């Protein structure tokens, strides 16, 4: 978690979209989770917009600000003029009344500070010291220059942003007041925290939550005249739209060509070539079409799309433009003279260095080699990993921001290589057919079992090479099939065949196990058993004959013995009778 962005780990799905969209690559992907590298982040908020899973969300200061409102009698809101487009209003007094209901003692448009900034720009430009002049109103642009394009610091206006300029003016009039900024910008949070002038920042999304929580309906609030109504039209209320700063000048100072650049990519392009320019005033804004398209702007009832939809930001631009135009019609213009108050709006913007290391050529090369990038032509620079070039990705790996193995061409190559090795070195025969029974893949073992000598069979009909009856049956029935001891006539082999249907890919996947030896062993065992039974039968029969012969001989001798014994018995009985007499 950072101070300004929170994360929902469960929702981060390894899509790398935030990294691809980040203009300064301030996202690290470690263990499949995206993390903001706080020291590198310029808080443009792009990652919060593009995340399809809403895994990133802006840290809310609502609890702290509710506490401020409860504990302080004097809390003043500084409201960015883009509120017009986000809340669909045409009058600041409506918003001011709503803030009063929430406990704010007063509220002003930040455009009061923007007006002071424009006057400072005029004063600086008239000195002739600036070959080129870059506006400092956008804190994300300021951070971008300080950290990534320090050579352009000499062109950056050393002036407060409108938020800080307004805070200084409010502090002058209300020295004990707490100042809360309200707007669509995340970068304002860091700017406020580092300034010590602003006590908190609420986004428009926070405000919508507050209004809902307190049952405040802006449409039901009647516009009314408010105290301290402006005497002059403030053209600086156009700051949140493209060309808004340029149009805030009553008369454009001479000696410059004026251009508005918005969107991170365009701003970076200009900053990279800034030293080739001369006499150019550049109004820069990190958000495309300006602050109205900020990361925390709202989708209003007019079906305005959020942030990354240009159609929505154009409608928002027109709403702010009409708001400024109507004020100019109703109030006299102000002559942009010097600010008649003792407030110093000067601000220094020093270079900011990070802990990232650029890396030596040998270090970058060594990392490239880990993903099989040995020659310049191996560096595809496809951008799938989120980085613009392979060398930029290698730099991220060196700094611990990325996993070296997350290179999709390399991962695919490695997966295909491993898959090829596994399939073609498998002891089992593997056959993959499409739904039309054409060969997608077949390994060497399957060819051996089927007796196929053709080298390349891919995309050819399988029926041209082997009997596909079982595959045809499985494909017709749309279910798995198993066949045991299937005889292959050509090779005299027996196989167990298992066919599975991969429904998602609409393919048939066959696995063949050679069981020829098992079948032959079973046949041999059966023969041996038969021979053993025959031998046993012969032995039994012979034993029976012997037994019968023995029985016959035993029968004759027994009869003769019986006759002899009877004769002996009679003789003994006769002799005993004579003796008795």
Image: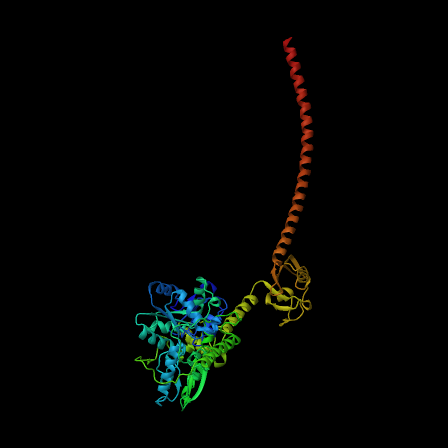
Q: Is residue 484 above or below residue 26?
A: above
Front residue of 456/122: it is 122
Percent coordinates x, y for residue 120 in the rendering: 36, 83
Q: Give the quarter of the figure containing the N terminus.
A: bottom left
Q: Residue at x 69, y 69 (%)?
A: 464
Residue 421 relative to residue 196: left or right: right
Instruction: Say if 556 sits above or below 218 in the image.
Output: above
Give how far across and how far down residue 477 sits, in percent. 67, 59
Counting labels gives 0
Answer whether residue 151 is visible to the viewer in this image.
no
Image quadrant of residue 250? Answer: bottom left
Look at the image and name its color scheme.
rainbow
Q: Is residue 189 among what the camera can see?
A: yes
Q: Which residue is located at x 35 percent, y 81 percent? A: 159
Q: Nearer the viewer, residue 216 or 514?
A: 216
- Is residue 164 found left or right of 516 in the rendered image? left
| Snapshot quadrant of residue 539 | top right
Percent of width and height locating residue 259: 45, 85
Between 146 and 425, which is closer to the camera in this rendering?
Answer: 146
Q: Considering the image in quadrants, where does the C terminus appear?
A: top right
- Name the residue located 66 percent from the left edge and 71 percent from the top edge: 460
**Residue 467, image x and y in percent?**
68, 64
Q: Residue furthest top?
A: 581
Please state if 349 lies on the left or on the right of 239 as rendered: left
Q: In the image shown, does 399 or 471 lie closer to the viewer?
A: 399
């Amino acid at each position: 978690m950072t101070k300004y962005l929170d994360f929902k780990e469960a929702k981060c799905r390894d899509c790398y979209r935030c990294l691809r969209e980040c203009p300064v690559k301030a996202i690290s992907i470690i263990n499949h989770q995206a993390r903001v590298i706080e020291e590198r982040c310029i808080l443009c908020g792009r990652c919060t917009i593009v995340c399809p899973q809403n895994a990133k969300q802006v840290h809310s200061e609502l609890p702290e600000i509710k506490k401020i409102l409860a504990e302080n009698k004097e809390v003043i809101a500084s409201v960015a003029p883009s509120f017009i487009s986000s809340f669909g209003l045409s009058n600041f007094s409506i918003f001011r009344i709503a803030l009063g209901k929430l406990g704010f003692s007063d509220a002003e448009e930040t455009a009061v500070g923007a007006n002071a900034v424009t006057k400072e720009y005029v004063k600086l430009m008239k000195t002739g010291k600036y070959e080129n002049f870059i506006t400092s109103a956008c804190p994300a642009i300021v951070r971008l220059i300080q950290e990534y394009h320090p050579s352009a610091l000499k062109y950056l206006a050393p002036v407060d942003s409108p938020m800080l300029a307004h805070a200084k003016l409010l502090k002058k009039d209300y020295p004990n007041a707490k100042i809360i900024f309200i707007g669509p910008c995340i970068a304002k949070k860091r700017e406020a925290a580092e300034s010590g002038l602003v006590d908190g920042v609420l986004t428009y999304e926070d405000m919508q939550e507050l209004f809902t929580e307190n049952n405040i309906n802006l449409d039901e609030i009647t516009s009314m005249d408010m105290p301290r109504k402006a005497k002059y039209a403030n053209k600086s209320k156009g700051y949140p739209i493209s060309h808004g700063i340029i149009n805030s000048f009553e008369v454009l100072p001479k000696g410059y060509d004026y251009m508005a650049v918005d969107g991170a990519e365009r701003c970076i392009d200009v900053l990279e070539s800034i030293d080739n320019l001369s006499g150019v005033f550049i109004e820069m804004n990190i958000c495309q079409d300006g602050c109205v398209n900020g990361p925390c702007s709202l989708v209003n009832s007019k079906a305005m799309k959020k942030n990354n939809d240009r159609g929505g930001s154009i409608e928002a631009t027109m709403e702010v433009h009409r708001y400024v135009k109507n004020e100019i019609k109703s109030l006299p213009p102000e002559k942009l003279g010097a600010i008649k108050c003792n407030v110093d709006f000067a601000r220094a913007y020093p270079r900011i260095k990070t802990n990232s290391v650029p890396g030596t050529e040998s270090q970058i090369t060594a990392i490239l080699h880990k993903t099989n990038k040995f020659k310049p032509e191996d560096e595809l620079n496809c951008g799938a990993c989120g980085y613009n070039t392979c060398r930029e990705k290698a730099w991220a790996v060196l700094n611990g921001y990325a996993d070296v193995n997350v290179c999709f061409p390399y991962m695919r190559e490695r997966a295909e290589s491993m898959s090829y090795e596994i399939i073609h070195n498998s002891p089992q025969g593997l056959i993959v057919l499409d739904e039309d029974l054409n060969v997608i893949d077949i390994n060497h073992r399957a060819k051996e079992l089927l007796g196929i000598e053709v080298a390349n069979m891919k995309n050819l009909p399988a029926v041209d090479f082997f009997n596909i009856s079982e595959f045809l049956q499985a494909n017709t029935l749309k279910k798995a099939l198993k066949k045991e001891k299937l005889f292959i006539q050509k090779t005299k082999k027996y196989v167990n065949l298992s066919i599975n249907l991969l429904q998602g890919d609409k393919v048939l996947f066959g696995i063949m196990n050679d069981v020829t030896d098992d079948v032959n062993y079973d046949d041999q065992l059966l023969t041996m058993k038969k021979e053993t039974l025959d031998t046993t039968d012969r032995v039994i029969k012979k034993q029976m004959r012997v037994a019968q012969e023995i029985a016959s001989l035993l029968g004759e001798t027994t009869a003769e013995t019986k006759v002899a014994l009877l004769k002996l018995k009679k003789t003994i009985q006769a002799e005993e009778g004579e003796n008795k007499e």
